[in-house]
Image (cartoon, rainbow, N blue to C red):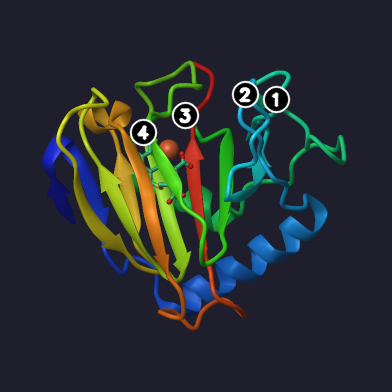
């Protein structure tokens, strides 16, 4: 495990190819029930370039009218989110070092030209719980800074199968995805990247 500045922990190549394939298969099956949706920015309604869905008792959604929030149902189907894959619960159990299980698994799907601007994750009640991220598919350029937007940033590449743990000081750092490198992984059927983030929302 690599520990980067601000206590951000990286486990490169944590998942084997066959573990990635199994996980992807499960994500695909669950995303067929809870389809990817286009998140819209609060107030402006501007679409984000990433598409999303969620698994778990709570899912992160955003739209023009109600903004960023967690809710128990899919914004378009109105159905409860599918369960979090057991494999992901096991990874949390082993590596999160936190007594309660995750409530949300946010699924971000990046087309080759998608990105995510620098932001903090502050929509959870519980900032003591870590966030655990798993990358699948094409490589990306991940950027992170400090707790203030103007703090200097560093960037590194995240690859398919990498796991990242954001706990302690790293939990409230600014972070984003500058770009995807299309065609750098053969895991997905087409170009693009999937990121799964496990979070505890309530205390
Ligand atoms: C650092 N996702 O969903 S994962 C997000 O690759 C998000 O899709 C990115 O940022 C992605 O909010 C980055 C790594 C990550 C996730 C959550 C964090 C880094 C984080 C929360 C706090 C600090
Ligand atoms: Fe984030």
Closer to viewer: mark 4 or mark 1: 1
Number of residues whose C-alpha sits closer than 10 Å to that of mark 3, classed few (under 14), some (14–19) or many (20 or more): few
The residue shown at (56%, 51%) is 108
Q: Is mark 3 within 8 Å of ligand 1?
A: no
Residue at the extreme bottom: 186
Q: Are marks 1 and 3 in contact (CB under 8 Å)?
A: no
Q: Are marks 2 and 1 in contact (CB under 8 Å)?
A: yes
Q: Are marks 4 and 2 in contact (CB under 8 Å)?
A: no
> Which label's residue is closer to the chain start, 3 or 4?
3
Number of residues whose C-alpha sits closer than 10 Å to that of mark 4, classed few (under 14), some (14–19) or many (20 or more): many
Q: Is mark 1 within 8 Å of ligand 1?
A: no
Left of 151 or right of it: where is 182?
Answer: right
Q: Which quarter is ligand 2 in? A: top left
Give whichever of 150, 105 is nearer the camera. 150
- Rendering coords of residue 2 (x, y %): 15, 55
Residue at which label 3 appears = 100
Q: Are marks 2 and 3 in contact (CB under 8 Å)?
A: no
The residue shown at (49%, 29%) is 200
Residue at which label 2 appears = 42
Residue at which label 1 appears = 64
Give whichever of 143, 130 is nearer the camera. 143
Q: Secondary structure at mark 4?
A: loop
**The N terminus lies in quadrant:** bottom left
> Which label's residue is closer to the chain start, 4 or 1?
1
Residue 92 appears anywhere in the view:
no
């Amino acid at each position: 495990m690599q520990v980067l500045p601000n206590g951000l922990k990286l486990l490169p190549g944590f998942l084997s190819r066959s573990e990635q394939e199994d996980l992807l298969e499960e994500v695909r099956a669950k995303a067929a029930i809870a389809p990817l949706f286009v998140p819209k920015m609060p107030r402006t309604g501007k679409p984000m370039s990433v598409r999303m869905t969620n698994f778990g008792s709570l899912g992160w959604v955003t739209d023009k009218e109600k903004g960023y929030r967690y809710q128990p149902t899919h914004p378009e189907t109105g159905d409860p989110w599918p369960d979090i894959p057991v494999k992901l619960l096991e990874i949390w159990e082993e590596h999160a070092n936190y007594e309660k299980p995750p409530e949300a698994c946010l699924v971000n799907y990046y087309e080759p030209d998608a990105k995510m601007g620098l932001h903090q994750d502050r929509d959870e009640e519980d900032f003591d719980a870590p966030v655990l991220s798993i990358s699948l598919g094409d490589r990306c350029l991940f950027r992170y800074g400090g707790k203030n937007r103007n703090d200097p940033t560093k960037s590194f590449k995240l690859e398919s199968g990498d796991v990242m743990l954001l706990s302690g000081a790293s939990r409230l750092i600014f972070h984003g995805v500058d770009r995807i490198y299309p065609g750098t992984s053969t895991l997905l059927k087409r170009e693009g990247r999937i990121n799964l983030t496990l979070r505890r929302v309530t205390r």
